[in-house]
Amino acid sequence: MRSNSNSDSMVAFIIAVVASFLLMLSSEVDAHSVCEKHHYLSLNRAFVHTFNTQPGVSSPGDTWTWHSKLMDTDTRTTVGEVAGTCISVPAGFWKCDETLIFPEGHIFVHYVHEPSSATSTGGITGGTWKYMQATGQIDVTEPAKRDDPWEVSLDVCLPVDRDEL
């Protein structure tokens, strides 16, 4: 069978161009991101514990859901809300997803909560409006006393040129 070297060369060239373009896009967003730190208190969390098997007996599959106000730790003003869900998994951990709700958009986060650790660290998985294409990290710290506020720290990174994408 005869190979068409012009055709093969053209295909290789197109693959190289596409790969270079994709690499440029991925590094462009990373190289042109602006990151900000934010610290909040999650006040008066209203929790609901749904038992998977028997009421009062914790087991894998149990869920915790909550909602609360978010207060900026610097200005002491309410800046938004947070709503979330954690699901108990067999290893004794909780798989958690939260949505932080601000007037300018929402931030979606995911983390694993280990009950023996006061602080859980996870990732920002995206967002809406101002926070579209958001990345970064979240730290959620459980209070020592039940009625004290939870601490929420965000390192939010947004691509500067996202309007051009």
Image: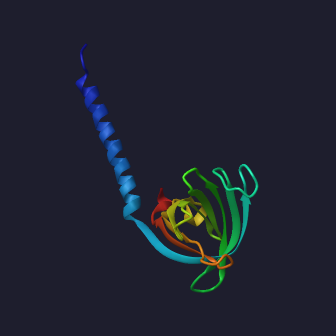
107 or 153: which is nearer to us?
153
The residue under the point 65% across, 79% down is: 148
86 or 161: which is nearer to us?
86
Residue 118 image position (x, y, % from top left): 54, 71
Residue 130 image position (x, y, % from top left): 57, 66
Quarter of the image where the N terminus is located: top left
In the displayed orientation, state which residue is furthest to the bottom.
75
Q: Quadrant of residue 142?
A: bottom right
Q: Is residue 127 visible to the viewer in this orientation of the structure?
A: yes
The residue under the point 63% across, 63% down is: 99
Q: Quadrant of residue 3?
A: top left
103 or 45: which is nearer to us?
45
Decide if residue 119 is on the left or right side of residue 100.
left
In the displayed orientation, state which residue is furthest to the right.
55
The residue under the point 33% across, 38% down is: 15
Colour setup of the view: rainbow
In the displayed orientation, state which residue is furthest to the top.
1
Residue 95 image position (x, y, % from top left): 58, 56
86 or 25: which is nearer to us?
86
Vertical placement of residue 74 versus 36, above or below: below
Residue 41 image position (x, y, % from top left): 61, 78
Decide if residue 131 is on the left or right side of residue 68.
left
